[in-house]
Amino acid sequence: MEQPPQRERLPSRLDILSNGHKLDVRAHQRTYEGAYTRSAIGCLSFSILIIKLFSKEFLPIGTIYTVYGSLLYFIGVYKASSVDTYYNPDKDMVMFKTSGDSVLLLSVISLVSYVALLVLILRM
């Protein structure tokens, strides 16, 4: 039997980047696709634990953790999807943008969540 001809591997978008830029892209992936996702999974798991193991009085606390974990996950997904705009030469993007806005957003979301948890716990 004759085998079909082997197709060459298509070049990755990372192949056109310098080694320094490849390292930056991988660092962004570890942060946004890794750390944010792991933190979100931890919050969602904790919310399931609270909702399943404790009585109805703890349902608002589990709900706050569910909302917090979901927001954390979606911010990570959004940031991970926007990484290529910093390094894609087709998009003519030469300026580096820091993550200050997303860090500020996460700080505000965390502060609001923790204040809401404190209020709920003190009202019990």
Image (cartoon, rainbow, N blue to C red):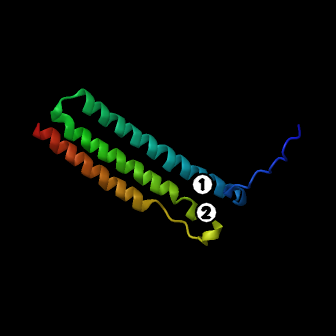
Residue 123 on image: x %, y %: 10, 40
- State which tag comes first along the sequence, 1 or 2: 1
Disc 1 + disc 2, Cβ < 8 Å: yes
Question: Which residue extends farthest top?
Answer: 53
- The 10 Å Cα crowd at callout 1, few under 14, some 14 to 19, many 20 or more, is some
Which type of secondary structure does the marked residue at label 1 adopt? Answer: helix
Which type of secondary structure does the marked residue at label 2 adopt? Answer: helix
Question: Which residue extends farthest front?
Answer: 1
Residue 77 on image: x %, y %: 46, 52
Q: Is residue 29 above or below residue 39?
A: below
Q: Residue at x 39, y 43 (%)?
A: 40
Residue picked out by circle 1: 25
Question: Which residue extends farthest right?
Answer: 2
Q: Is residue 99 left or right of residue 94?
A: left
Q: Residue at x 40, y 39 (%)?
A: 41
Q: Is residue 61 left or right of residue 5?
A: left
- The 10 Å Cα crowd at callout 2, few under 14, some 14 to 19, many 20 or more, is many
Identified by mark 2, the residue type is: Tyr
Residue picked out by circle 2: 87
Q: Quadrant of the N terminus?
A: top right
Q: Quadrant of the C terminus?
A: top left
Q: Is residue 69 left or right of residue 10?
A: left
Q: Residue at x 45, y 51 (%)?
A: 76
